[in-house]
Image (cartoon, helix red, strand yellow):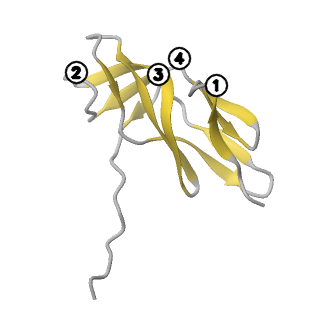
Amino acid sequence: MATSVHQLDDGAWLSVNDSRVVNVSDLWWLARHDVCSCEMADFLAERFVEIGVDHPAIEGRIAGRCIECGESGVTDWLTLGRVVDPESGRFFGVDPASVHVPRRRQRLASSTG
């Protein structure tokens, strides 16, 4: 069974199998990030900009602002949760209050023959 993943309400929600599972307006504790110059950003999520799947992880880029310095920006890819049972669509979200390290997605190396 395929797992349906998309964003709803102009980026306000992440939906997995037609259930709203992660919303914006949470504070994300970010380390090693590019949003602002704060060493650790207490990042207020305002909307999901992009959603992707790196099986079994569901990832997203989030627009928002650091509540310490006020700088706005968009994160690199953050793990939002994992689909732990594709048959049932059971999803476990991450805890936004734990420390997260955004990462840039890497393309797989291609053979140049």
Q: Nearer the viewer, mark 2 or mark 1?
A: 1
**The residue under label 3 is which amino acid type?**
Ala
Residue that numbered label 2 is attached to = 38
Query: How far separated are the C-alphas under marks 2 and 1?
Result: 30 Å
**The residue under label 1 is which amino acid type?**
Asp
Query: How far separated are the C-alphas under marks 2 and 3?
Result: 16 Å
Comes first in the chain, label 2 or label 1: 1
Placement of 100 over or under 104, stated as above or below: above
Comes first in the chain, label 3 or label 1: 1
Q: Nearer the viewer, mark 3 or mark 1?
A: 1
Tell me: 94 left or right of 100.
right
Residue at the spot x=36%, y=39% of the render?
76
Comes first in the chain, label 4 or label 2: 4
Residue that numbered label 1 is attached to = 9
For mark 2, give the secondary structure.
loop
Query: How far separated are the C-alphas under marks 3 and 1?
Result: 14 Å
Placement of 73 over or under 103, stated as above or below: above
Report crowding for label 1: few under 14, some 14 to 19, many 20 or more residues within 10 A (C-alpha): few
Q: Quadrant of the C terminus?
A: bottom left
Report crowding for label 3: few under 14, some 14 to 19, many 20 or more residues within 10 A (C-alpha): many
Placement of 75 over or under 17, stated as above or below: above
The disc at residue 52 is none
Are circles 4 and 2 on residues that touch, CB within 8 Å?
Answer: no
Comes first in the chain, label 2 or label 3: 2
Are circles 4 and 3 on residues that touch, CB within 8 Å?
Answer: yes
Residue that numbered label 3 is attached to = 45
- Taking the view exactly as shown, the residue that stands out farthest to the left is 37
Tell me: 47 left or right of 105.
right
Residue that numbered label 4 is attached to = 25
